[in-house]
Image (cartoon, grey):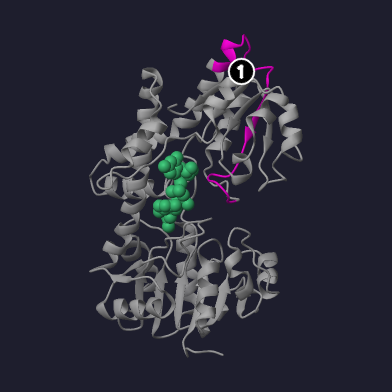
């Protein structure tokens, strides 16, 4: 039964938009979904959850209450329009706002007086007022009079069993005080978590960007430590766990094969570019990106050293990359370091076998057994739960000689005891 007379339109039904649409439906809003892809539209209208990593929303999607279309027409029937489209970077790491721009242009064509337009996509400070607002006001409409514009940065943590769209606290900001009140009221009607109203829309944009650049520099910090501790012969993984038992003023991050995903690996470039335009050079953020982007090559270099010890080279050795996803237990390869590792290995003439249960179509073998049989050296690139239960004896039996543990997830001592050459990242 519909509890709210307002209708919501969600543009972009991916990792961010579909859980949000499902939550709004479950809270009694009429919800229109707008997305690319006729097949995706059909599936959602048939009650099929198109996000395998978000099983919690399956029962809500099955109720078929989200009215999905590829066209923007239903915007005319919505009181609140929420933009949840990707904000990627191109191959030169330049921010690509084209999805946000086309969403704003699509809204403009179907705008209705009094609408509240909310951007959830991660953007740098200034995008709402310098990019989105000029489009929405380009036909003479005025923010604060004909519509409101707010920003509520998404905080989805894909694959998390603890945090979800409903319980994660949020921040919201708007161009006008009235817009902030309306946006906060909407989010408080669907969320259990705190909704904090920021003093401006720029502050809301900046909140998300500093959350993720904070994470990127902390990961870069431990990745740089890994390179020095490898030379010092100190197990950084253990040392971080030692430091982590300090109950205050330390937040553990862990070195790895690299930083992937559509958030941490991307968001810093938005702030770097916007600050550059304003005349400031974010040397520290850029260095962190450089360090994190260097980890796939560092990992492949460890494989080359390890193979040299056995008198072998990358070329001509059957090598396996275990895991394509950018992080454990999700099926998402956006900016995944695995892809860079594979590219580097193939550039060195390696025959690369790939296995990721989340990507059977991109795997070169059907299952883990076939993978282990085919390879002599393994780079563990994703710590999926399926890979954590692989026993050292299975690797020994499969005559695996070298393991490069890109996630420091396997048992170093046990593998070394079986005569397998083991190298971790910083261990
Ligand atoms: N990574 C490391 N070392 C770490 C943590 C992560 O190498 O200590 C790597 C991961 O393997 C992955 C990448 O960094 O390749 C990103 O990992 P992530 O855990 O940050 O995963 P994301 O990209 O899903 O980040 C999301 C973000 N959420 C939003 O942007 C809304 C981020 O803000 C959260 O902090 C993060 O989830 C989280 O905490 O899980």
Name the image quarter holding residue 303. Answer: top right
Residue bearing mark 1: 419
- Where residue 214 appears, as percent x and y from the top left, is 32, 47
In this rendering, the answer to whether 24 lies above or below 410 is: below
In this rendering, position of residue 109 left or right of residue 127: right
Q: Can residue 88 be seen in this view?
A: no
Label 1, residues with CA under 10 Å away: few <14, some 14-19, many ≥20: few
User: Per the image, is 93 magenta?
Assistant: no
User: Per the image, is 317 magenta?
Assistant: yes
Name the image quarter holding residue 208. Answer: bottom left
Name the image quarter holding residue 381. Answer: top right
Q: Can residue 3 be seen in this view?
A: yes
* Between 230 and 119, the one nearer to me in the picture: 230
In this rendering, the answer to whether 13 lies above or below 285 is: below
Instruction: Please identify the quadrant where the C terminus is shown.
Output: top left
Q: Is the magenta stretch mostly helix, strand or loop?
A: loop
Q: Which residue lies furthest to the top in this view?
A: 311
- Where residue 327 appears, as percent x and y from the top left, is 53, 45
In this rendering, position of residue 332 left or right of residue 143: right
Residue for point 55% across, 23% down:
422
What segment is highlighted magenta in the picture? 306-330
In this rendering, position of residue 368 left or right of residue 261: right
* Between 102 and 333, the one nearer to me in the picture: 333
């Amino acid at each position: 039964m519909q509890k709210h007379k307002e209708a919501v339109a969600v543009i972009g039904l991916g990792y961010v938009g579909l859980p949000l649409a499902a939550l709004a439906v479950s809270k009694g809003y009429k919800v229109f979904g707008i997305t690319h892809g006729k097949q995706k539209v059909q599936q959602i209208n048939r009650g099929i959850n198109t996000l395998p990593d978000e099983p919690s929303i399956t029962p809500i999607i099955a109720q078929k209450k989200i009215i999905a279309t590829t066209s923007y027409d239903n915007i005319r029937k919505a009181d609140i329009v929420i933009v949840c489209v990707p904000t990627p970077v191109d191959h030169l790491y330049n921010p690509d706002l084209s999805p946000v721009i086309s969403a704003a242009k699509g809204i403009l064509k179907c705008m209705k007086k009094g609408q509240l337009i909310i951007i959830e996509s991660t953007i740098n400070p200034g995008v709402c007022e310098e990019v989105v607002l000029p489009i929405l006001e380009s036909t003479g409409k005025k923010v604060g009079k004909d519509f409101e514009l707010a920003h509520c940065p998404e905080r989805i943590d894909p694959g998390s069993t603890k945090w979800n769209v409903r319980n994660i606290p949020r921040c919201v900001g708007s161009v006008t005080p009235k817009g902030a009140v309306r946006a906060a009221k909407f989010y408080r009607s669907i969320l259990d978590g705190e909704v904090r109203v920021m003093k401006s829309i720029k502050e809301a944009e900046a909140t998300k960007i500093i959350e993720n650049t904070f994470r990127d520099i902390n990961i870069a910090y431990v990745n740089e430590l890994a390179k020095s501790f490898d030379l010092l012969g100190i197990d950084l993984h253990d040392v971080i766990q030692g430091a982590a038992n300090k109950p205050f003023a330390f937040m553990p991050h862990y070195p790895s094969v690299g930083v992937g995903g559509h958030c941490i690996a991307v968001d810093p470039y938005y702030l770097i570019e916007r600050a550059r335009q304003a005349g400031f050079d974010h040397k520290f953020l850029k260095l962190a990106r450089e360090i994190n982007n260097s980890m796939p090559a560092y990992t492949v270099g460890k494989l080359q050293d390890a193979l040299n010890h056995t008198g072998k080279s990358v070329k001509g050795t059957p090598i396996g990359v275990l895991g394509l996803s950018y992080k454990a237990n999700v099926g998402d390869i956006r900016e995944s370091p695995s892809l860079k590792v594979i590219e580097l290995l193939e550039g060195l003439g390696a025959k690369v076998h790939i296995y990721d249960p989340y990507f059977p179509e991109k795997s070169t073998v059907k299952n883990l057994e076939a993978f282990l049989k085919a390879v002599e050296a393994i780079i563990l690139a994703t710590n999926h739960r399926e890979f954590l239960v692989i026993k050292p004896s299975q690797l020994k039996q499969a005559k695996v000689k070298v393991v490069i543990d890109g996630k420091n997830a396997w048992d170093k001592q046990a593998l070394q005891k079986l005569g397998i050459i083991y190298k971790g990242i910083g261990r």
